[in-house]
Image: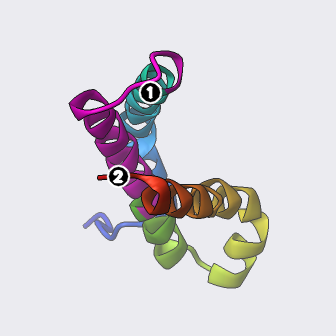
């Protein structure tokens, strides 16, 4: 009987194209937000979309870390992925602090 356990490699294969599509959604929403200089409900929608897509990438990173074997080695070899997920946090916090919403 085949081993049906989820592995980091299997997870990556299963999520590659969905994450690629999510990247495009993020790119459109972020570009719309920056280029159109949004305000009001449109800005809220664009921020919501970028926030949800960021959260999906955070979930992906955490799942891949949990599934990795050995975890320490995987973490050391994926520091760029960590930076991509973690660096938007200070910017998002600053936007929320300055936002009238």
Sequence order check, earlier mark of 2 and 1 = 1
> For the residue labelled by badge 2, is the local secondary structure a helix, a strand or a loop?
loop
Instruction: Residue 48: say if magenta.
Output: yes
Residue 36 percent across, percent down from the top left: 45, 16
Identify the magenta region.
Answer: 34-58
Q: Looking at this rendering, what residue extends furthest in the front direction?
A: 100
Instruction: Residue 32: say if magenta.
Output: no
Confirm whether residue 14 shows in the render: no
Task: Give the residue number, with chain letter if any, for mark 2.
Answer: 100
Residue in the foreground of this view, choosing between 57 and 92: 92
Residue 58 percent across, percent down from the top left: 46, 61
Residue 34 percent across, percent down from the top left: 52, 25
Residue in the foreground of this view, choosing between 68 and 89: 89
Tell whether 58 sits left or right of 78.
Answer: left
Tell whether 51 sits left or right of 79.
Answer: left
Residue in the foreground of this view, choosing between 70 and 88: 88
Placement of the N terminus among the 4 image quadrants = bottom left
Task: Give the residue number, with chain letter if any, for mark 1.
Answer: 33
Residue in the foreground of this view, choosing between 86 and 30: 30
- Cα separation, mark 2 vs mark 1, equals 16 Å
**At 45% from the left edge and 39% from the top edge, which residue is drawn?**
16
């Amino acid at each position: 009987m085949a081993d049906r356990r989820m592995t980091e490699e299997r997870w990556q294969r299963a999520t590659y194209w969905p994450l690629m599509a999510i990247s495009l959604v993020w790119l459109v929403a972020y570009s719309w937000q920056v280029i159109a200089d949004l305000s009001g409900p449109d800005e809220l929608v664009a921020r919501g979309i970028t926030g949800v897509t960021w959260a999906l990438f955070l979930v992906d990173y955490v799942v891949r870390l949990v599934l990795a074997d050995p975890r320490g080695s995987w973490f050391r070899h994926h520091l760029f992925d960590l930076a991509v997920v973690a660096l938007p946090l200070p910017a998002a916090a600053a936007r929320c602090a300055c936002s009238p919403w």
